Image (cartoon, grey):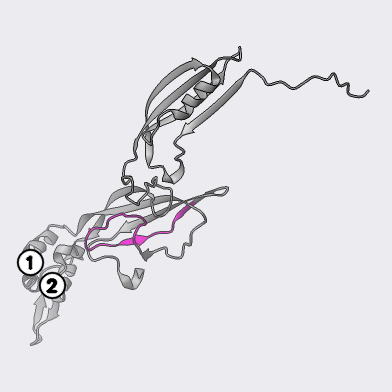
């Protein structure tokens, strides 16, 4: 059976809706965040007049407009609803014209999010920066005392071949406070170990060839004077096309990591 044409004409439905949003600021170029405060107003009247009013409503980067114009069931009247949402400058964003866009932490390697972990580890007492000037006989004598050698034991000879006891060597150390610490059994000190992890979204899986090399954390993380960072193997999470990278760096003590080993 064929389709019967009843000669029905096409007519416009009474229902009609138009929506606008102003301004069109999105993505990384948008340096503002919403405060949660809003203002809503409504008007009724002829469609054509309310449409003109909707297009003339004020808006700005800090007062953003969302407006909806709806024609009512009788077809002659319409209702206009306008909502203004309040926005403020995002923390750290430059003022207009400053030339630098605000980047959300973690959006790239240049703007990562950071986490800081601090633990305490025991370090040999003689490695403390306070005793970095000790050398030669002094270090030998102190190490022997740490290892349990009796102070009455003969440990060397002088230029004439006479025996020299550990006690005599310790008298030449020049830092009797340190000698007394070791005599009381203090052989280590507690040193903070600081690790910084920089996490960011990446476009691909990064190269891991820089692991266990001296390198600075990405972004603008500051470094204490006289110290540097050792990069560990990064942690990588891949979910489909989305890749997240976590780079961890260990802070050295004063003097930095040994360049012969970690260069």
| Residue 93 within the segment the image draws in magenta | no
Residue 257's quadrant in the figure? bottom left
Q: Is the residue marked by circle 2 packed among few (<14), some (14-19), or many (20+) residues within 10 Å?
A: some
Which range is magenta?
Answer: 216-236
Residue 227's quadrant in the figure? bottom left
Q: Is the residue marked by circle 1 packed among few (<14), some (14-19), or many (20+) residues within 10 Å?
A: few
| Quarter in which the C terminus is drawn | bottom left
Q: Residue at x 46, y 38 (%)?
A: 24
Q: Residue at x 16, y 76 (%)?
A: 136
Direction from residue 224 to residue 22 in the image, left or right: right
Q: Is residue 181 above or below residue 240?
A: below
Q: Is residue 17 above or below residue 22?
A: above
Relative image position of residue 152 (x, y in whole percent):
10, 70
Mark yes or no: residue 261 visible.
yes
Relative image position of residue 110 (x, y in whole percent):
39, 54
Q: Report the residue that reaches farthest toward the bottom.
A: 160
| Residue 235 within the segment the image draws in magenta | yes
Mark yes or no: residue 154 visible.
no
Secondary structure under the numbered disc 2 in the rendered image: helix
State whether the magenta stretch is mostly helix, strand or loop. loop
- State the residue position of label 1: 175
- State the residue position of label 2: 138
Q: Earlier in the sequence, mark 1 or mark 2?
A: 2
Give the Cα distance between marks 1 and 2.
Answer: 9 Å
Relative image position of residue 183 (x, y in whole percent):
12, 61
């Amino acid at each position: 059976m064929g389709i019967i044409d009843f000669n029905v004409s096409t007519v416009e439905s009474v229902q009609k809706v138009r929506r606008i949003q102003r301004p069109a600021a999105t993505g990384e170029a948008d340096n503002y965040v919403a405060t949660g405060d809003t203002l809503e107003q409504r008007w009724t009247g002829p469609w054509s007049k309310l449409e003109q009013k909707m297009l003339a409503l004020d808006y700005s980067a800090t007062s953003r407009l969302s407006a909806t114009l709806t024609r009512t069931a009788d077809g002659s009247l319409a209702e206009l609803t306008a909502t203004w949402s309040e926005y403020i400058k995002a923390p750290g964003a430059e003022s207009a014209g400053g030339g630098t866009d605000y980047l959300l932490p973690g959006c790239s390697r240049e703007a990562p999010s950071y986490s800081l972990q601090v633990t305490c580890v025991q370090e040999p007492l003689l490695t403390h920066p306070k005793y970095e000037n000790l050398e030669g006989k002094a270090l030998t004598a102190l190490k022997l005392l740490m290892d349990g050698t009796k102070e009455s034991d003969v440990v060397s000879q002088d230029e004439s071949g006479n025996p020299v006891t550990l006690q005599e060597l310790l008298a030449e150390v020049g830092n009797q406070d340190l000698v007394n610490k070791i005599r009381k059994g203090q052989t280590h000190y507690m040193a903070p170990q600081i690790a910084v992890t920089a996490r960011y979204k990446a476009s691909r899986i990064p190269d891991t060839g820089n692991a266990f090399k001296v390198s600075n954390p990405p972004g603008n993380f500051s470094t204490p004077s006289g110290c540097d960072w050792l990069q560990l193997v990064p942690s990588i999470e891949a979910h489909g096309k989305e890749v997240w990278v976590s780079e961890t760096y260990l802070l050295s003590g004063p003097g930095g990591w040994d360049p012969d080993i970690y260069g």
